[in-house]
Amino acid sequence: MTIAEDTTGSSRRFNLAAWLSRYGTLLAFLLLIAFNVVATPNFLSLQTLNVNLTQVATIVIVAVGMTLVIATGGIDLSVGSLMAIAGALAPMILMGAIAPTTDPLVVLPLAFIVPLVVAGLLGWFNGFLVTHYSIQPIVATLVLFTAGRGIAQVMTNGNLQVFKNPPFQFVALGHVFGIPTQVLIMIVVVAAAAFLIKGTALGRQILAVGGNEKAARLSGIPAKRVKRFVYVISGVLAGLAGLIVVARNSASDANLVGLGMELDAIAAVAVGGTLLTGGRANIIGTLLGACVIQLVRYTLLANGVPDAAALVVKAALIVVAVYIQQSADRT
Amino acid sequence: MMQESPRSNIVAALIPRSNLQLARLCVITVVFALLIFGALRYDNFLSSYNILSFLRYNSMFMLIALGMALVIMTGGIDLSVGGTAAMTSVVAAILSPYGWPAGLLGGMAAGLAVGIVNGLVVTRLRIQPFIATLAAMLATYGTALLLSGNQSVSASYDTAFVSIGQDDFLGFPIPAWIAIACYVVGWIALERHPVGRRILAVGDGEATAKLMGLKVGRTLLGVYATSGLLAGLAGVILAAQFGAGQPTEGVGWELFAISSVVVGGTLLSGGVGSVGATLAGAILLAMVFNILNFENGLGVISLSAYWQSVIRGAFLLVVVILQAKLMNGRSPR
C-alpha cells in the first residue's frame, strides 16, 4: 500500500520534472515572447526579429557543432580561436595578401573555401589529439584555444583589417526572400544537424559513442573516426561563423572575433537540454537555448536593465536550466 | 614479495615511481633549462630587477593556479577565477579608502563568497562544476561591472592599500610573499595533512570516498571556497598593483591557470596532483613571455607579443602529448 503510494507520488513529481526538462526551454521561450509582446514597445516588428536573429545566428551555428562534440562526451574550447583564424584569412585572401591576385572570380571562392578548410583541419587536429593520444577534450582543445588566437594575431600582426567586398559580405548582409542570409545559413545548419542526429546511422553512432564509448566500440562502431568527425564539423562551423562575423563588420580584428564564443555556445547547449555528460544531442534545444539567452538579454536591455545585470541573470538561467535537466535525469 | 638489496632501493628512489613524479621532474627540468638558457643568453635575465618584477606580476597567476590545482584534484574545474579576480579587484578598490585591511579583507571575503556559492551549487544542486563555475564567471563579471559602473575604479593612494601590490617587504615584493605563504600552506595541507588525502580520495572516486566515510560534500565545498578565496586575493593584488579595480580584467585567467595545472602534471580527471609542480607550471608558462621580451630586446629577432600565446600553446601541446605517451606505458598512478 505504502509502496504503491510512494511510486505514484514520486512518478507524478518525476513527470513534472521530465516535462519541464523536455519542454522547459520552449516554455521559457514562449513566456519570454508573451512577456515582451505585453511589456516591450515595438516588440512585434520585423526589425526586432531581425536584430535578435542576426545576434543569435553565429552563436547557434557554433553551438550546433558544440552540441555534436558534447554528444560524444567531449567539449571544444577552440571554437572562438578558429573563428578568429577563419575571420583573419578571408580578408587577406580578398585583398590579395595570400594569393597574388584580386580577380573576384578566383578570390571569392578561395575566401570561402580556404578558411573553412583550414578550420576543418584544425578541428581534425583537435579530434586527433583526443582520439590518438586519449587526451581529455578540455585539455586537447585548450591547445588551440591558446595558440589559435595567437596564430590569427600573428597572421594579421594584430591589425584591424578593414575591407569592402559586397559579394563576400552577402553571407552576412544579404537577404534571400527577405530573410537575412546568416539566418538562413543558421536554419540550414540546424536542419542538417537535426537530420544527422535523427535520420542517419552516423547520428546514432555519435550518440552511442557519447553514451558508452566502450560498448559502442565493441559493437563495431568506429568510435575514433566518429569523434574526429564531430571535431571537424565543429571546426568548420566555427570557421563559417567567423566568416559571417567579419563580413557583418566589414572588418576583421583577430583580437576580438569569436572572443568568448566557446562559453556562449556551451551555455546555449546547456540551456537547450544537452547535458555535458554525452550520449544526447538536442539540436532544436540548442537553437531554443541560444534564442532564450538572447531574448532574456534583449528583454532586460529593452526594459532599461543594464547589460551587466543581464549577465547575472544569464548565469542564474544556466544554473536553473541545468538543474531542471539533471533532476529529471536522476529520477 | 622479493628481497631488495639496498642498492636497488637507492635506484628505485631516484627513478620516478609514478607519472606524476615523472611529469613533475619534466616540468622542473624544463624550468631550469629555460633559466640556464636565459641566464647565458641575456645580460640582465637573472638581475634582481627582472626576477622581482617577474614575481610581483606573476604572483596573481600563481595564486589562481594553486586554487585551480586543488579544485582539479577533486575532479572538478573552476572557470570563475578570472571573473572573481575582476570582481574582487573592484570590491577592494571601492573599500581601499577605509584602509588597507578593509580593501584586503573585503576583497578576500568577496572571493570566498563566490567560492562558497560555487561549492554549494556543485554539492547541493549537483550541477557539473564546468557549468556551475561558467555561470559564476558570468555572474562575477556582471557584478563587477555593476559595482564599478562599467569603468575602472581608482584605488585610494591615501591609505597603504596600494603597498600590497607595489611595495617590498625585506627586499621582496609583497605579492610574492603572499603567493609563497599560500603555496606553503597549500603544500602542507596537501602533503602533510589528512585534508590532502581527502581531496585526492574524492578526486579518485566520489562514491568510494563516500563509502569510506569521508565527508565528500564538505571537501568539495572547501576546495571551491579556497579557490574563490585565492582568486579574491589575486584580485586584491591586481587592484593594488595597478592602482585600480578593473572589472574587465581577468579574461582568460582561468585557462592560464588550467594550463599551469596541466603542465604541472595534474590530471583533469582528478585524484592526483602536486602543489609544487603547479607552481613550476605557472612559472614555466610565465617565463615564456619573459624570455620573449628579452629576445626582442636583443634585437636579433622581432617577435610580437602575439607570439607568446602561440608559443604557450605549443608548450602545452608538447607537454600534453608527452604526458599522454607516458600514460599509455604506465599505470595511471
Image (cartoon, rainbow, N blue to C red):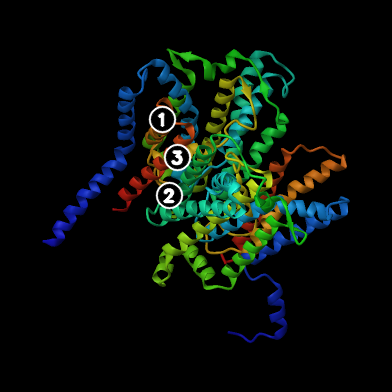
In this rendering, the answer to whether A174 lies above or below B59 is above
- Looking at marks 3 and 2 on the same chain, the residue that comes earlier in the sequence is marked by 2
Residue B272: x and y in percent read 56, 64
Q: Residues within 10 Å of mark 3 (few under 14, many from 20)?
A: many
Q: In 3D space, how far apart are the residues under numbered discs 3 and 1 (Cα atoms)?
A: 11 Å
Evaluate whether label 3 is on the same chain as label 1: yes
Q: Residues within 10 Å of mark 2 (few under 14, many from 20)?
A: some
Residue B254 appears left or right of B51: left
Question: At label 2, which amino acid type do we have?
Answer: Thr
Residue A31: x and y in percent read 30, 31
Where, by quadrant of the figure, is residue A303 drawn?
A: top left
Which chain is disc 2 placed on? A
Q: Nearer the viewer, residue A16 or A199?
A: A16
Q: In 3D space, how far apart are the residues under numbered discs 3 and 2 (Cα atoms)?
A: 25 Å
In this rendering, the answer to whether A193 lies above or below B21 is above
Evaluate whether label 2 is on the same chain as label 1: yes
Question: At label 1, which amino acid type do we have?
Answer: Leu
Question: At label 3, which amino acid type do we have?
Answer: Val
Evaluate whether label 3 is on the same chain as label 2: yes
Q: Is residue B317 visible?
A: no
Q: Residue at x 39, y 44 (%)?
A: A280
| Of labels 2 and 1, the one closer to you | 1
Q: Which mark is residue A312?
A: 3
Q: Which residue is mark 2?
A: A277
